[in-house]
Image (spheres, grey):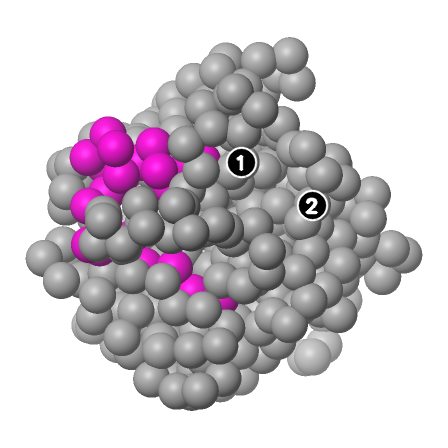
Amino acid sequence: MSDRSSDEEQVSFVGIPTFIHAPFVRSFVELQQEGADVAIVGAPAEMVINRPGARFGPRAIRQAGYVESPNDYVYHMELEVYPTRVLKIVDYGDAACTPLSIELSHKAIKSKVSEVLKAGAKPLVLGGDHSITLPVGTAIAERYGFGEVGMIHFDAHADTWDSIYGATVSHGSPMRRLIESGAIPGKNFVQVGLRGYSHDEELLDWMRDQGMQSHRMSDIEQRGFDVVLNDAIAQALDGPENIYLSVDIDVLDPAFAPGTGTPEPGGLTSQQLLRAIRRIASSVNLVGMDIVEVSPPYDGPAGLAAEAAHRVALEAISSLAWRKKNKK
């Protein structure tokens, strides 16, 4: 790190905990005035059955990492880019979620993300449980057109159940609702990292009937991650020109992300996921992203899941910066 000793500089644990010390904007008017390329939005909504705590995810992800203020010194070694010098990044705070109503929480999230899109920025949303993908994905589809956005979804679980304990809106069903609404076509809905025991034959049949593309961990082991990733990108872009990226932190093996609601052994490594994020965000028209299911109460003193989620977000931002820099 170069010499950093001015009175304006602050270490990572000092100051308002925005993501990478990005400027905090309070209102839509301020957001428009900033002319941001990327806006961080917290979505602390949760209706989790197992190991709750995802509502605390946005704050934990923001507080993770070691980026100091001002953040213009941050340099991605592999991409050879200063992301905060190429992109204007702001933190737009949290949607006004309530633990008493998932419907009201989703309404607030959709409104917040719609404002980001209206201001011309890309939303990078920090969850929260995976139910937030429904309002975020709907807002993105309304902006770019229903059927005009493909999805690449990293997760141990498909999240395509029709209902869970009678509830049709939960962290187990957002992908089904997005497909049923027409927001994202089934054939352009691509999932990577599926494994475990939470899928039955009827559910997998429904997914195949929608044309969904599912790449299980066994596929990655047999065919190689690069081959699977290339297929996933091509399938998501078979028609649409835009990509929405959704990352459930439980796609990682619990050794790398213990703090999550439904850990599944046998997952990706941090290195694999970060490389995948770089590959996608630097090569496609990424119009939005979410990172979900970080549960700080189960993350231990090291906060590994929050650290991984923080780095996933920063990796995406750096890749977007590289793409913008090299398109000039």
Q: Residue at x 27, y 54 (%)?
A: 208
Which x, y percent locates residue 281? 35, 66
Which part of the image, by quadrant, shows the C terminus? bottom left
Which x, y percent locates residue 23? 55, 42
Sequence-wise, the earlier of marks 1 and 2 is 1
Using the rendered image of the protein, determine whether residue 8 is visible from the camera's viewpoint: no
Q: Residue at x 13, y 62 (%)?
A: 238
- State the SS at label 2: loop
Q: Residue at x 54, y 58 (%)?
A: 156
Residue span colored magenta: 173-193
**Dots 1 and 2: beta carbons under 8 Å?**
yes
The tag on residue 129 is none
Q: What residue would you read off at disc 1?
A: 171
Q: Type of residue at label 1?
A: His
Gap in angstroms between the C-alphas marked 1 and 2: 10 Å
Q: What residue would you read off at disc 2?
A: 261
Residue closest to the far right: 301
- Horizontal placement of 184 versus 157: left or right? left
Q: Residue at x 38, y 52 (%)?
A: 204
